[in-house]
Amino acid sequence: MPRAMPNKRKLTAIFLQKVKPQARAYLMWDTLQRGLVLRVEPTNYRAWKVIYRHHNRPRWYHLGAADAIGLADARKLAAEVMLEVVRGKDPQAERKAQRGAGTFAEVAERYRDEYAKKRNKSWAQADYLVRRHLLPPWGKLSAKSIARSDVRAVIGRITAPVVANQVLAAASAIFSWAIKQELVTINPCSGVERNETRSRERVLSDAELPQFWAAFDDAGLLHGSALKTILLTGQRPGEVAAMRREHVRDGWWTMHGKPDPDSGWPGTKNGQTHRVWLPQAAQAIIAQLSNGEAGFVFGRSCQTLGAAMRAICQRLSAERITPHDLRRTHGTTITALGFGREAMNRIQNHREGGIADVYDQHRYAEENKRVMEAVANRIMALALGSTGPSNVVHAQF
């Protein structure tokens, strides 16, 4: 069927009095004022609309009821709207943002609950950065009022370049989502320069390891135990922090690839189920925390360990080191003991996937167990200041 031609004519007050409702709502376009439309409902309710295009998509802007706004005023209002469109703005989106954005704290909360928790496995880290750096200065401000200068001011106060970049990324993600929800119209983080950073190569030296091991005890029982477990197992800090007691059986820790919102398990970073042996030293640490009940090994409050590490570095006057650097130290120890990079990738879940992973889940169980115990023995010997020869026999692969 050919498309029906739009009803277009120069609207007049006399003509508007003669317009009758029909079985379906229809539009009357004014040829004098571009974009101005009268919408007539079957109930005979009439309203002025302005219809324009933004990014090649139609947008409808409601002016008001026709019995409240005369034709002359409707044309003036429509002209104002179309002027904003010519300037590159989207009046309908701006109106919706004006009504629904609320404060930055409200928008950040909606982003976290409606999007981040469902899509981003590392949402807790980003949420911590938002609460730590963004909510204090912005929380009570209208989200749409935050400008690029505000972003630069907040980022400029953060001394650690990597943290500043992470905060900028967290803020940008919130505003990008808010634009899609038509809560705001611009992302003030766009155009704000990121700090230049170098790839991390930091590992604990043999001399530093006993100092940090002792300092872990000053971070509190749960945080200190979690940091020690990262160093002894080489697993990702976020996964260690979320370790569940029911996932540990006979010394083996099974990390399921898929997240489990009911239990709080975030899933592995690469989405692959991973099974790793907990060396005796790590089992002893966990045993001190276990109360025989299902739940988080290190408690719900142990989701962010970066702050604890920063405090330790300050007390020791040491070069900055992160929880992830403890994982890197473990991997470096694997290769230093002669077990090879393949063993390191296998133990730290750096797998590429494929059919071999499906049928090869337990082939290296005993080898992995020997590697984990050897590495843990080496770390504990350094941590406790042992200078005697190691009694570990290194397997040759």
Image: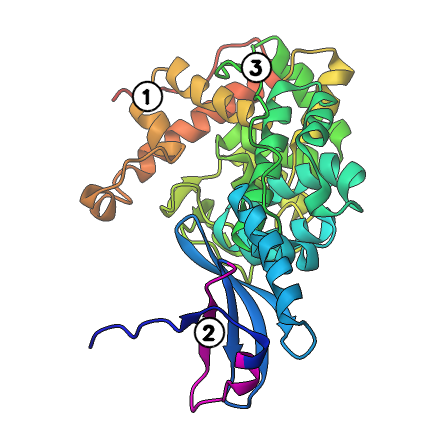
Percent position of residue 275, x then y: 39, 44
Question: Which scheme is used to colour this image of the protein?
Answer: rainbow
Report if residue 294 is visible in the image.
no
Observer-nearest residue: 369 or 327? 327
Type of amino acid under label 2: Met
> If you read the primary sequence from the N terminus, does the residue marked by circle 3 or circle 2 appear first?
2
For residue 207, above or below residue 263:
above
Type of amino acid under label 1: Arg
Inspect the magenta stretch and tell me whether residue 30 lies in it.
yes
Secondary structure beneath label 2: strand
Numbered label attached to residue 341: 1
**Residue count near mark 1 (Cα–Cα under 10 Å), binned few <14, some 14–19, many ≥20:** some
C-alpha gap between disc 2 and disc 1: 72 Å
Q: Of discs 3 and 2, which sits in the foreground?
A: 2
Q: Contact, CB < 8 Å: mark 2 with mark 1?
A: no
Residue at the spot of label 2: 28
Numbered label attached to residue 22: none
Q: What stretch is highlighted in magenta?
A: 15-33
Residue at the spot of label 3: 204
> If you read the primary sequence from the N terminus, does the residue marked by circle 2 or circle 1 appear first?
2
Q: Is residue 364 left or right of residue 153?
A: left
Type of amino acid under label 3: Leu
Secondary structure beneath label 3: loop
The quadrant in which residue 131 appears is top right
Q: Which residue is drawn at 44% across and 44% down?
A: 268
Q: Residue at x 68, y 25 (%)?
A: 152
